[in-house]
Amino acid sequence: MNPEFDLSFERVVDVPPELVWKAWTTPEHLKKWFTPAPWKTVHAEVELKPGGKFHTLMESPEGQQFPNTGCYLEVVPNRKLVWTGALLPGYRPANLTADVPFVFTAIIAMEPSGTGTKYTATVMHSNADGRAKHEAMGFEQGWSKALDQLVALAKTM
């Protein structure tokens, strides 16, 4: 990790890696936790393979929609997911626009820890400006709240 470009947080949660994985890789589950409330994820698509599609459609409390389409780079069942918005499915380079404040690659690591999971989210940005914008948007608070939502959902699965 490069602290100049990357953001990360780590926490041990009290659900097993298999349930964390299921929440991350099942579109019906992903829609229930992925976006910190009061925002919502109204659509999700998961093509769980390297080069496969990872797509979410987030909606603000005011109803504004924000589509995000990326490409999985690495898929290790129950242990690791890596995807990026810099590429579209099939590793096709994305056309970045002025509407996209930054692009990143996310690494979600899930390690067994007792009966729970050591969860590590690392988000790699292309430059310090992208990192700063993501941090200012509330990266740690937002991703942490989403993880709380994931854990609450996993306990019902």
Image (spheres, rainbow, N blue to C red):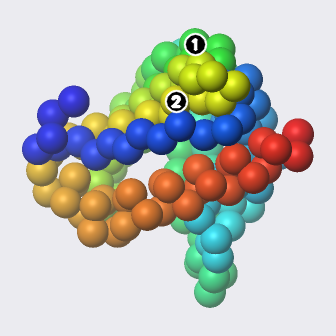
Q: Nearer the viewer, residue 50 or 146?
A: 146
Q: Residue 76: which numbered mark, if any?
A: 1
Which mark is first along the chain, 2 or 1?
Answer: 1
Q: Quadrant of the N terminus?
A: top left
- Taking the view exactly as shown, the residue that stands out farthest to the front is 114
User: Dot 2: what SS?
Assistant: strand
Position above or below: 65 against 41: below
User: Dot 1: what SS?
Assistant: strand
Q: Residue 118: which numbered mark, if any?
A: 2
Q: Residue at x 46, y 20 (%)?
A: 73
Residue 117 x, y percent position in the rendering = 60, 29
Spatial distance from mark 1 to mark 2, Cα to Cα? 15 Å
Position above or below: 98 against 118: below
Residue 38 x, y percent position in the rendering = 64, 76
Question: In the visual, does 4 lie left or right of 1?
Answer: left
Position above or below: 86 against 114: below
Q: Nearer the viewer, residue 37 or 96?
A: 37
Q: Nearer the viewer, residue 57 or 133?
A: 133
Q: Residue at x 53, y 51 (%)?
A: 68
Residue 124 in which image quadrant: top left
Residue 77 in which image quadrant: top right
Q: Residue at x 82, y 44 (%)?
A: 155
Question: In the visual, does 125 lie left or right of 44?
Answer: left
Tell me if I can see residue 63 in this picture. Answer: yes
Q: Quadrant of the C terminus?
A: top right
Q: Which amino acid is tagged 2?
A: Lys
Question: In the visual, does 40 lie left or right of 128?
Answer: right
